[in-house]
């Protein structure tokens, strides 16, 4: 499951999905669930970036983004990210910061879920 596009790699700040799922403690998740989680993560990171950069966008940028956001799927995500790269100074840095923050939040949530699951199993 390492077939990330260049833009997805740039957005998620990872080289491959295997390392991401290992880092999150989810290496044993089945491939279908990994794909669904990855798609959700991409959408979440895009939304976090959009919230962060919204104040610096022009009206024209907002109009273009609004039009791009109506589309869904991997190609639509690529178009959106490509546009953001073209209009947002230091996009790479912003994307890396948001992904790092998001991964840390996910690690905490996953650890909490695993602890709850373990406690239920012991009861």
Image: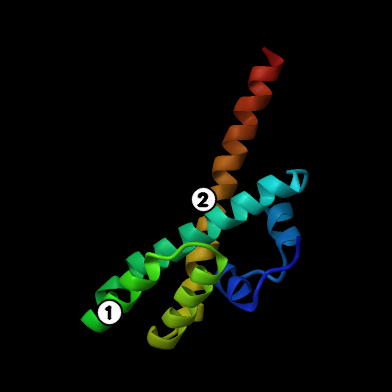
Vertical position of residue 35 compared to residue 65: above or below: above
**In this view, 100 is above or below 27:** below
Depth check: give the residue in front, 68 or 55.
Answer: 68
State the SS at label 2. Answer: helix
Residue 108 quadrant: top right
Where residue 7 appears, x then y in whole percent?
58, 76
Residue 25 showing in the rendered view: no
Q: Is the N terminus in the top left, top right, bottom left or bottom right quadrant?
A: bottom right
Indicate the quadrant where residue 50 lies: bottom left
Q: Residues within 10 Å of mark 1 (few under 14, many from 20)?
A: few
| Residue at left offset 67%, top offset 12% | 123
Q: Please name the residue that numbered disc 1 is placed on.
A: 56
Q: Position of residue 18 (x, y in %)?
A: 75, 59
Is tag 2's residue or tag 1's residue first in the polypeptide sequence? 1
Residue beneath the point at 27% across and 76% down: 63
The residue labelled by disc 2 is 105
Position of 18 with respect to 48 (left or right) is right
Is 111 displayed left or right of 99 in the figure? right
Which residue ends up furthest to the top in the rendered image? Answer: 123
SS at circle 1: helix
Residue 92's spot in the image, x, y percent?
A: 51, 79
Residue 39 visible at all: yes
**Residue at 53% from the left image edge and 61% from the top image edge:** 42
Of circles 2 and 1, the one toward us is 1
Q: Position of residue 34 (x, y in %)?
A: 68, 50
């Amino acid at each position: 499951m390492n077939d990330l596009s260049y833009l997805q790699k740039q957005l998620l700040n990872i080289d491959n999905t295997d390392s991401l799922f290992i880092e999150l403690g989810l290496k044993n998740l089945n491939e279908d669930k990994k794909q669904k989680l990855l798609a959700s993560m991409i959408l979440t990171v895009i939304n976090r970036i959009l919230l962060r950069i919204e104040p610096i966008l022009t009206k024209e940028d907002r109009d273009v983004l609004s039009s791009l956001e109506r589309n869904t799927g991997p190609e639509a995500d690529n178009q959106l990210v490509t546009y953001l790269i073209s209009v947002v100074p230091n996009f790479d840095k912003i994307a890396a910061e948001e992904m790092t923050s998001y991964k840390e939040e996910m690690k905490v949530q996953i650890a909490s879920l695993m602890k709850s699951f373990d406690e239920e199993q012991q009861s």
